[in-house]
Amino acid sequence: MEPLDRRSFIVTAGAAGAALAAGSPVSGAAQSNGAVFISTWQWGIPANARGAEILGAGGSLMDAVEKGINAIEDDPNVETVGYGGLPNAQGEVELDAGIMNGTTHRAGSVCNLHKIKNPISVARLIMEKTRHTTMAGEGALQFALSMGFEPMQLLTPKSLEAWLKWKNDPNHKTFWIDKDHHDTIGMLGTDGKGHVVAGCSTSGLAWKIPGRVADSPLVGCGYYADDSAGAASATGNGDVMTNYCTSAFIVGRMAEGAHPQDACDQAMRFMAKTAPDVTGGEYCVIALSPAGETGAASMNAAQPLQYAVWRGGRATPLQTAPAYRR
Ligand code: GLY
């Protein structure tokens, strides 16, 4: 997947800005009545397109969000999700994902999954085939294998080379100190009939300490969905955002009547109020109401969030107006 030029993303500020962009028609995309998808980063565009295609072909909204995220997990060029995701400090790719059904209020999530390139599909099966919500590590792998997933090497030549370069650098930083390299795919959808689904998938921070779990696979942190209020997802520094239950925070504000944009802005402001140093970090969120209103916010100008909205057969690349100047 080719990176998109930053300038091709329309900067949004506030609810009006988020609603304004009309977008470009997507050739061949099904125009499902009232359906809306919103996804993080530049790969949100192909994720949304795949989701719309699935929904337009008669799939469920859950199918659409799962398959939309699968498209990014399968892409070896996305270094922070699925196959080709950068590994942990020991050179092992550890994947995290979660998905939530806003009607049933049920979620499934998988943490530290090795050797399986589609953790969002494993998370969905945990939700649908078991009474559990979250599975991790070796048990999660055994569950995936029992469900028929094929184990594979998730390192690509490119990600192996990147890990070796880091490993062989005598001055390399570790997470006993710091390092930033994380972008998830967060995807939210509504079917236009009041149903919402939220999903999130990541390989987490490059070179993370093995066993590290951050916000993405944790329900309420990386993703949350409730048909009575809306859906939200988070991307960025998950070690910090986990402490804020960001997605549940946003959906909670929407349950009280906030527009998705206001709810996202409130999340950024609350984080900055309680931990002022976060205004220099990468913290980004997206939100969607059951009626299809969207919102997105990011903490600072150095790291705006590129995201994508699909509505009525039109795909719009957008970029947040950050909350803080740094
Ligand atoms: N938000 C993704 C991560 O920190 O792993």
Image (cartoon, rainbow, N blue to C red):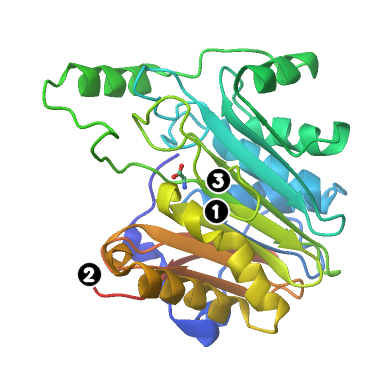
First in sequence: mark 3 vs mark 1: 1
Question: Residue at left 56%, top 59%?
Answer: 245
Q: Where does label 2 land, which residue?
A: 326
User: What amino acid is found at the position of numbered circle 1 in the picture?
Assistant: Ile
Picture residue at 47% right of the left edge, 28% below the top? 76
The reply to whether dot 3 and dot 1 touch (C-beta < 8 Å) is no
Q: Nearer the viewer, residue 171 or 35?
A: 171
Real-space CA distance between mark 3 and mark 1, rounded to the nearest whole angstrom: 20 Å
Disc 3 secondary structure class: loop
The quadrant of the image that shows the C terminus is: bottom left
> Hey, which residue is sitting farthest left in the picture?
171
Residue receiving disc 3: 216
Q: Residue 298 lies in what quarter of the image?
A: bottom left
Mark positioned earlier in the residue sequence (2 or 1):
1
Q: How far from the left and from the top, in percent, is residue 53?
A: 74, 49
Cβ of disc 3 within 8 Å of ligand 1? Answer: yes
Q: Position of residue 165 (x, y in %)?
A: 21, 21
According to the picture, the residue beneath numbered tag 1 turns out to be: 45
- Residues at discs 2 and 1 in contact (Cβ within 8 Å): no
Marking on residue 323: none
Amino acid type at image mark 3: Ser
Q: Describe the element under mark 2 as helix, strand or loop.
A: loop
